[in-house]
Image (cartoon, grey):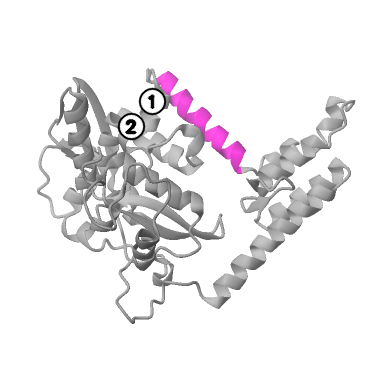
Amino acid sequence: MNEIVQAGGALAVRPDQTAWTPEQAAVLRQSGIKDQVTAAELSGFLHLCQRTGLDPFSRQIYLIGRWSKKDGRDVYTPQTGIDGYRVIAQRVTAQTGGTYGYEDTLWCDAAGRWRDVWLAEEPPAAAKVTVIRNGQRFSAVAAFREYVQTFPDGNPKGLWAKMPAGQIAKCAEALALRKAFPHDLAGIYTAEEMAQADNSAPTEERHLRTVQPGEGDPWATSTPERNAAVKGRSQAAQDFADTAAAAADQATVKDVYRQANAAGLLGATVKTVDRELLELGAYLIARGQELAEPHETSEQADEGVVDGEVVGDQPEDDHAAAVAELRRFAAENGIDDIDRDAYGALGAPLNDVSASAIRGLLAQLRGTAA
C-alpha cells in the first residue's frame, strides 16, 4: 500500500512520518487549504494518505473545505476520484489475495424499470453497481436526485449535464466499493459523490484551486465580516459554557441550555474547564447531570436539563431516531448485519455519521426493496 507514498522527492509522504513537513504544508496551503483547518483534520488526512497509498501532491487525493453553519467554520473532507477507489481495490486484492470484479451496471428509469444500457436523452433516475469480492456480492444503488450537481436554477451542470448516466454510475460504484472494502475506503469519498455539496453555494465558500505566483487568492482567507461573525458566535458559545461551568445548581444550566438552543449554538465547539473540546449542547447536558442532587426523585429529575422538552431538540435524539428507524427497517427486511452494510455504504460506523446521512441510506434501501 506504500508504493506511491514512497516515491522520491521532497514532497514524498513517508509511511513513518507523524506530521506534515514544512515543504508539504506549504504546498497543501497553496492548494487552497486555509489556516483555519484543524490539526485533527490535517493529521487525519496524513493518516489517510498513508493508509490508502494515494499521493496528495499528484492530485490523487485532496482535502476540500466547505463552510459549515453548524461548526461555524470551513470543514475539510478528503476526496478522490473513482479511479483512486479502483486503484485501492486492485492493490488490496493483489496484496491480500482473493478476487474482485463487477456485475453489469444497471440504470433505472422514472417508472422503476432497470436497463443494462442507458440510451434515453433524459438522465436516469438511479444506477446500481454490484462489486463481487471473494465470491460475495456487494450491491449499491445511487439515486440521481441525491447526487446531481446543479446550478442555482436546478439544472444539472458540468459532466452531470453532459454524461449523467456515467456520473451516477460512478457514485453507485463508489458506494459498492466502500461496502466491499470498508477498511481501505472508510473516511474518503469520491468527487462525484460530493459534487452536490456545492449546489447553490456562493463561490467564495469553495476552497480548492491552485494559487499562481504573485496572485492574490480571494478564497485564501475569509472576509472580515465572516471572521467577525464566526468569532462572535464562538465567543457567545464559550460564554454559555463558562456560565454553566460556574453554575451552582442544575436550574441555571437548564436556563443556559435554553438560551443557547434559541441562539442556535448547541452544535458549536467549546472548551471545558478541563480544556476538553466538546459540543456546547453535550457539555451542558453533562454539566446539568453533574449538578443533579443524588437524592432527587424521578419527578424532580424530569425538571432537569435532560428532560424530554429540552433534549427533544438535540441532534443526539434525532440521530438515535434515525438509527432506530434504520434498524427497524433492517429487521423487517431480513438484513442480518445492518451495521456492517451501513459502514460499507457510509464509510464510517453509524455513531460517526449524521442523521441525514443515515436517512439517505434508508431511502436508498427502501428504493431497492421496492
Left/right placement of residue 348 relative to residue 177 reads right
Q: CA distance from mark 1 to mark 2?
A: 9 Å
Tell me the SS state at disc 2. Answer: helix
Task: Name which residue lies at 75% across and 58% down.
Answer: 239
Q: Amino acid at mark 1?
A: Arg
x then y, percent, for residue 282: 67, 42
Numbered label attached to residue 340: 1
Residue sitting at x 45%, y 65%: 34
Q: Which quadrant would residue 15 be assigned to in this image?
A: top left
Q: Mark 1 or 2 closer to N-term?
A: 2
Q: Residue 319 colored magenta?
A: yes
Secondary structure beneath label 1: helix
| Nearest to the observer: residue 300 or residue 350 | 350
Residue range in magenta is 315-332
For the residue pair 274 and 202, the one nearer the viewer reads as: 274
| Left or right, residue 277 beside residue 198 | right
The reply to whether residue 332 is visible in this rendering is yes
Identified by mark 2, the residue type is: Pro
Determine whether label 1 and label 2 are within 8 Å by CB: yes
Which residue position holds label 2? 182
Residue 91, compared with residue 229, is above or below; it is above
96 shown above or below 363:
above
Tell me what residue is drawn at x 82 percent, y 31 percent: 301
Label 2: few (<14), some (14–19) or many (≥20) C-alpha neighbours in 10 Å:
many
Tell me residue 232's x, y (percent). Answer: 66, 67
Q: For the C terminus, which image quadrant? A: top left
Q: Main secondary structure of the magenta part?
A: helix
Magenta stretch encompasses residue 51: no
Disc nearest the viewer among 1 and 2: 2
Q: Is residue 116 left or right of residue 280?
A: left
Q: Quadrant of residue 306?
A: top right
From the top left corner, tell me how far across and down residue 122 is, in percent: 18, 54
